[in-house]
Amino acid sequence: MKIKNILFLMAVIFAFVSCNDDTDPVLPQYKASELTHPDNNTLYELKQANAAETMLTLNWKAYRQNDLMVGAVTYWIQVDTVGNNFANAQTLQQVAAVNEDAEFTNYTASLNVEEVNKILVNSLGFPVGSVSSLEIRVITHIGNILVPSSASNVFQARVIPYKAVDTSSLYMIGADFGNWDWASPGIVSMVPVNGVDGAFWCINYFTAKNGFKWAPKKAWGDDFAELASKSGYTVADGNAFVPADGLYMVYVDYTAGKITIAPAKVYGMGDCFGGWDADKFVFTNDGKTTSILTTGAGELRMYAGLPEGVKGSDWWTREFIILDGKISYRGRGGDQDRVKVEAGKTVTLDFKAGNGTIK
């Protein structure tokens, strides 16, 4: 193994010494890749709502590497701060070489928003929300050796990174919801929309004069009162406010970057309400509670209706039932336990207290 490594290093040294120019190198496997990229100084504003989308696509022409017998070839896409000469180069992506007997091979790689943002903020220390300049290049990696002479031409761009927020959970706090105390049992746990990443909802009673906001954890620091857009409420002094006292539904969609608040609409579903048509059997809001009369016997199934303007999902993604006198939410789970009711029963829900009755 040691002899093999020594021979490889001798070959590398010989290649560096023997290459008189870039147009006719003695060992063509060391000829630099040719990178095709967008216009230099293009500005990219990164947003968490677009985390899974492509930030940019790079194309490069890599010259033949299959003459080397000492290790696999990969192409590393590197990024660093402009003017740093890649002294602190970070690898964005690695692309395996294609072993073909041709002078060169064309490669393509797409960089998505999330992977770029993570490296810029966590590894390079780019400030969130401000414009910074970066450089990107492609360099050849052979076995365990990074070949400096293979570095491609450089693409320079400007970028505005974002602060990543955990979207696995969401809580609502306010004067009416825990009295601004994260240790309070009055904090509202927002319900995940089943099968819709980054979407949460809740129904509760709100007082117009009392502000509220949200946070991904029960702590200050990443709290917010709005995202890129909002509907149905106002923001003042960093807190959210509804227009009037009442029962409202809150729908937070991280992916769309939008929060929507609207008067709550609750629906029944199934034989005990008269059928399986969506958005037909609506509860009646009465102050802080909402209720409906069953018209037949069957399993009790209920769900929260979507506010106007919110992208739709199936009704069961926002389903809940009553178990042991409490409202039990489906969230990310599977089918819930079934509760059977008879005709002529009044089903009443108190979302503020978290209770439900069947009488």
Image (tube, rainbow, N blue to C red):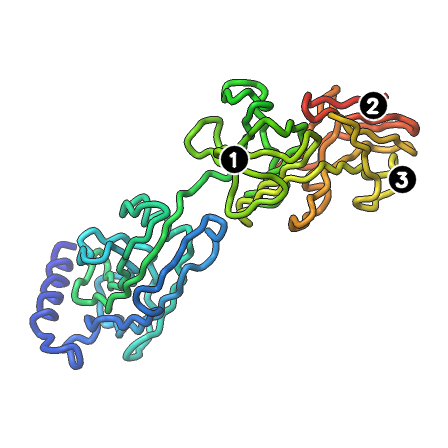
Q: What percent of the width, then of the height, locates residue 322?
A: 75, 26
Label pair 2/1, CB-CB below 8 angstroms = no
- Dividing the picture into quadrants, the one containing residue 71 is bottom left
Q: Can the viewer see residue 74?
A: no
Q: Residue at x 21, y 65 (%)?
A: 151
Disc 1 is placed on an element classified as: strand
Q: What percent of the width, then of the height, locates residue 243?
A: 65, 35
> For the residues marked 2 and 1, what is the alpha-carbon distance in whole angstroms?
40 Å
Q: Is residue 4 left or right of residue 64?
A: left
Q: Is residue 81 above or below residue 23?
A: above
Amino acid type of the residue tagged 3 in the rendering: Gly
Q: Residue at x 41, y 31 (%)?
A: 221
Q: Is residue 339 left or right of residue 12?
A: right
Mark 2 and mark 1 lie on one chain; the one further toward the N terminus is: 1
Is residue 257 or residue 119 the one in the foreground?
257
Q: Which mark is residue 91?
A: none
- Dividing the picture into quadrants, the one containing residue 77 is bottom left
Judging by the rendered image, the residue that carries numbered circle 3 is 274
Judging by the rendered image, the residue that carries numbered circle 1 is 236
Mark 3 and mark 2 lie on one chain; the one further toward the N terminus is: 3
> For the residues marked 3 and 1, what is the alpha-carbon distance in whole angstroms?
44 Å
- Most distant residue in the left direction: 17
